[in-house]
Image: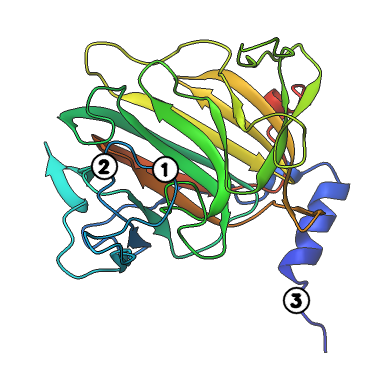
Amino acid sequence: MKTKPTLWFTALLFTCLGLSSFLPKKEWTPLLDKNLTQWETYLSYRHKLGYNGKVPTDAQGKEIAPIGYNQKGQTVFTYMEEKGEPILKVSGEIYGCVYTKQEYENYHLKLKYRWGQNKFEPRKDLLKDSGVLYHSIGESGKDYWRAWMLSQEFQIMEGHTGDYWSIANSAIDIRAFLPEGMMNSVADAKQPFLGFGRGSGRDGLCLRSENRESKNGDWTQIELICYKGKSLHIVNGQVVMVLQNSRYVENDKTTPLTKGKIQIQSEAAEVYYKDILLKELDELPKEYAAYF
């Protein structure tokens, strides 16, 4: 009795015959719904001015426990609608994150953000700040602010959207200019790759190549493309950073960091997110492959 070919065999056959364009296309998956069913939350502390990276203590010097995971009634991460559109509101008043239940490896993520009005200590007099953290693994609270998982950061910040930050003991290579003295390194798609973060000999910050953020309170769209340890930070359609060799270093051992959950930060500023969509990738899109 003849059997039907498997989907894998069919895909292979179509590819060999040069008919891959006839295969079903990967679809965009919405990650935002009314009950935030694809997300979990973690809240750490209401950090104060003068925070030094240590666990906060009370008046008697006793360590204060973080608020923790999936607290009922929390109002830092909430769902709302604006003109019928689903929106994630991040109040920012407590450091923490909303993070995907699922891990992702090779994917294209896109979303839009817009700043609110409110800011909180310890950043009340600083720029509004948030971020998307990718390849997130392990427990929350592993960073300086005791709020996030080990991960790589796509910075969302006034004047700095697209910057890279190393979270905890992560590291990565970025096409960037060599830093000099007290200057920060700046990304540039035509420069060679430099290491940033743990074990690289440089700190974990690299500035995006240019400011592409929307003005006048309009929505800014960011895109994150991840494929086999490579990533691209894209702001309003412009590539502002090219990264590869995602990894973390622990006890002098380097381990690839190529998959994990996605976190959205609460970092002392009110911010709104919408159109959070993800598409899994079988290959790096051709228009971006040349960056590597």
Q: Residue, x 47% and y 31% (percent of image)?
A: 155
- Numbered label attached to residue 48: 2
On screen, 122 above or below 90? above
Rendering coords of residue 73 (x, y %): 14, 66
Rendering coords of residue 98 (x, y %): 35, 54
Mark 1 or 3, closer to the camera: 1
Report the residue marked by disc 1: 52
Q: Residue, x 88% and y 48% (percent of image)?
A: 16
Q: Nearer the viewer, residue 48 or 143?
A: 48
Report the residue marked by disc 3: 4
Q: Nearer the viewer, residue 110 or 196?
A: 196
Q: CA distance from mark 1 to mark 3?
A: 63 Å
Where, quadrant-wise, is the C terminus in this rendering? top right
Quadrant in which residue 174 is drawn: top right
Callout 1: few (<14), some (14-19), or many (20+) C-alpha neighbours within 10 Å?
few
Q: CA distance from mark 2 to mark 1?
A: 10 Å
**Callout 1: helix, strand or loop?**
loop
Residue 95 in the figure: left or right of residue 73: right
Rendering coords of residue 280 (x, y %): 59, 50
**Callout 3: helix, strand or loop?**
loop
Q: Nearer the viewer, residue 52 or 236?
A: 52
Where, quadrant-wise, is the N terminus in this rendering? bottom right
Mark earlier in primary sequence (1, 3) = 3
Q: Amino acid at mark 1?
A: Asn
Q: Residue, x 64% and y 53% (percent of image)?
A: 105
Say whether marks 2 and 1 touch (CB < 8 Å).
no
Residue at the extreme left of the image, as rendered = 83
Q: Residue, x 51% and y 25% (percent of image)?
A: 162
Residue 235 showing in the rendered view = yes
On screen, 198 above or below 262? above
Residue at the extreme right of the image, as rendered = 16
